[in-house]
Amino acid sequence: MADLEQGSPTFAMLCCAFGAELAVKESMIADGWRLAFSRPGFVTGKHDAAPEPPTGTFIRTSSRSIGQCRSENGQEQIKSLIELLKSSPLASRPFDQIHVWPKDRAPIGRFDFEPGPDEVTKLVADEVFAAIKGNHLRCDSPNRIAEADERVLDVVLVEPSHWFIGTHTATTWPTRWPGAVQPISPAYEPVSRAYYKAAEAITWSGFDLQAGDLAVEIGSAPGGACGRLLELGLRVLGVDPAEMDPRIAEHPKYQHYKARAGDLPRRVFRGAKWLLVDSNVTPDKTLVTVGNLVTHQQTSFQGLLLTMKLGDYTHADRIPKWERTIRGWGAKNIQVRQLARNRCEVCFAVTM
């Protein structure tokens, strides 16, 4: 806020999952924003006052917009960027970090697409960094994880020849990651992409999972999320009628119940602190199963990470109903976010 004149309008640029734009736009309009340029996975808007840029369930990244650069010539692009930085009050002092990433080019999972910096983006990031380091940047390389409260220069590649430039302050974990996609290097090849979903959910939630804790995963096969829990040193109880990958099934800290959670006696879950659920069933069925578990006198879960399948973004209006159901279990705190690795689904982080 110190970089802006009081009363001047705010321009915001937001990234989201490909297909989630309507949900993002509806939340922006409700908060008094006027919509501007948008593309699948990318939305901009203007506010006559100077509030913080919007945040919400489906907003992956949120930045104050500085402007845009558009040219087929890469050097001309960089010259335009430098001119923007020289003229903008938002760039009156050097940034602590620079994050460069592309907007999503397809729905997550289609043609094996996953969000985050790609090879083209990495080349652009290196070129931009080399051109503006020193005068406009304090960091020693691009796309580093930002420290809390650092100012980040954002470069979003809407197209390789069309960049939007903005800035945000790193606060939560997603705002510290380039493009809000968690950089992670698995200790071994993950069993499935659920490994990355679990890793992001655990970090974003703020849950204090400790080695030796007992965690339950419902819908555990083939074992991607279990792999992350085991990597963190937890004991894991997996519940799924399907078979587990041998790397998980044979792990000394893993126990498999080849059944449905509702068919197991509640004493099976005694002593478990954490519950993860990512099953291919409707959210209403998920909530019935989980509600019966967490409200039972023999269980004492401290935190829940629940993946709720939307099926279609038009079903986003059901989220408040699901939240009310969860509050009825005695939940102390609920966070809801479409994680970077979520497909058409959202994650509920629930503190009990």
Image (cartoon, rainbow, N blue to C red):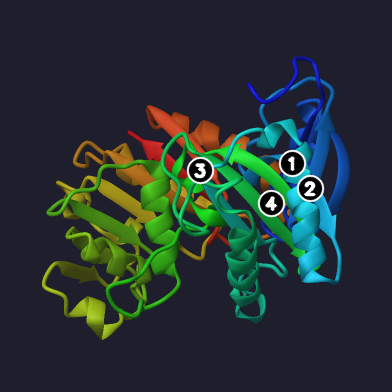
Q: Nearer the viewer, residue 259 or 39?
A: 39
Circles 4, 2 touching at the beta carbon (< 8 Å) = no
* Mark toward the viewer: 4 or 3: 3
- Could you say whether the residue bearing mark 1 is in a helix, strand or loop? helix
- Badge 3 or badge 1: first in the primary sequence: 1
* Mark toward the viewer: 4 or 2: 2
**Does the image show residue 314?**
no
Crowding around mark 3 (Cα neighbors within 10 Å: few <14, some 14 to 19, many 20+) is some
Q: For the residue marked with disc 2, what is the amino acid? A: Glu
User: Disc 4 versus disc 3: distance between alpha carbons?
Assistant: 21 Å
User: Disc 2 versus disc 3: distance between alpha carbons?
Assistant: 19 Å
- Badge 4 or badge 2: first in the primary sequence: 4
What residue appears at the point 71 percent right and 70 percent down from the top-left corner? 106
Q: Residue furthest bottom?
A: 246
Q: Quadrant of the C terminus?
A: top left
Which residue carries the number 4 mark? 15
Q: For the residue marked with disc 4, what is the amino acid? A: Cys
Which residue carries the number 2 mark? 83
Q: Position of residue 182 (x, y in %)?
A: 46, 58
Q: Nearer the viewer, residue 180 or 255?
A: 180
Q: For the residue marked with disc 3, what is the amino acid? A: Asp
- Badge 2 or badge 3: first in the primary sequence: 2
Q: Quadrant of residue 185?
A: bottom left
